[in-house]
Amino acid sequence: MTGVPASATGGTGRPAPRGKLGAAAVNQASLWNIANILTMVRLVLVPGFVLLLFQDGGHDPAWRAWAWAAFAVAMITDVFDGHLARTYNLVTDFGKIADPIADKAIMAAGLISLSLLGDLPWWVTAVILARELGITLMRFWVIRHGVIPASRGGKMKTLAQGTAVGMYVLMLTGPLATLRFWVMAVAVVLTVVTGLDYVRQAVVLRRSGLAAERAAAAERADAR
């Protein structure tokens, strides 16, 4: 199945004429794929998660459990939408922009909400969000020289953050409350360590990119 409507091919199996209508049909079909739909579901879950978390003052165990369920679904869609997009060639410009926004939005919503409720120290929220924003801006800074790929450490960081925030959303007591503290501590350490590693990669990538540009400019000058 190509995802192109029959009207785009004239209903006869022949390719549609090259034109604005045919291009629009193909672009529209490629946008509404399962990977992008999961990303949009995650974006919609962000305000829903916050509303559930703050019901009855934000300290009702039942509402917190529902908020955890919304957060868990959002994190699961984060795993599957990227995998589906890469596996079935469903990568779109919309997905490239919306997917990281959805990732940052659900995590930021969880951290800020928990800090507003007094369940999580503000310095933890500040460290994690500053790292995420800084790395995002840094990727744009070096993007003309190349793309910094997601590392295994970065994936571990994301898993640790999601697990820790999920445990804080639930109103845990006893040993589980102690465990969530240590899970969040691991998440913070991974956040800082992987952030420093991304900075190192960005500096190396920019230096090599600038060196390549200078070499190419020198070759063009010699050829004149």
Image (tube, rainbow, N blue to C red):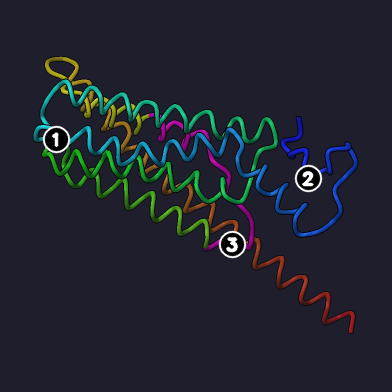
**Label 2 is placed on what type of residue?**
Ala
Horizontally, residue 191 falls left or right of residue 50, namely right
Horizontally, residue 194 falls left or right of residue 108, namely right
Q: CA distance from mark 2 to mark 3?
A: 44 Å
Q: Which residue is identified by label 2?
A: 8
| Rendering coords of residue 134 (x, y %) | 40, 56
**Label 1 is placed on what type of residue?**
Asp
Q: Which residues are magenta?
A: 141-159
Task: Indicate the quadrant where residue 5 lies.
Answer: top right
Q: Is residue 140 above or below residue 8?
A: below
Closest to the observer: 197 or 75? 75
Q: Residue at x 83, y 77 (%)?
A: 220
Q: Residue at x 85, y 48 (%)?
A: 16
Secondary structure of the residue carrying tag 1 is loop
Horizontally, residue 4 falls left or right of residue 49, namely right
Q: Earlier in the sequence, mark 1 or mark 2?
A: 2
Tell me the quadrant of the picture where the C terminus can be found.
Answer: bottom right
Q: Nearer the viewer, mark 2 or mark 3?
A: 2
Tell me the quadrant of the picture where the N terminus can be found.
Answer: top right
Please give the label number shown on residue 163. none
Q: Nearer the viewer, mark 3 or mark 1?
A: 1
Q: CA distance from mark 3 to mark 1?
A: 40 Å
Q: Which residue is identified by label 3?
A: 206
Q: Residue at x 39, y 49 (%)?
A: 132
Q: Nearer the viewer, mark 1 or mark 2?
A: 2
Task: Indicate the quadrant where residue 189 lies.
Answer: top left
Per the image, is 153 magenta?
yes
| Rendering coords of residue 36 (x, y %) | 55, 39
Q: Earlier in the sequence, mark 3 or mark 1?
A: 1
Q: Which residue is identified by label 1?
A: 119
Per the image, is 10 magenta?
no
Closest to the observer: 213 or 170? 170
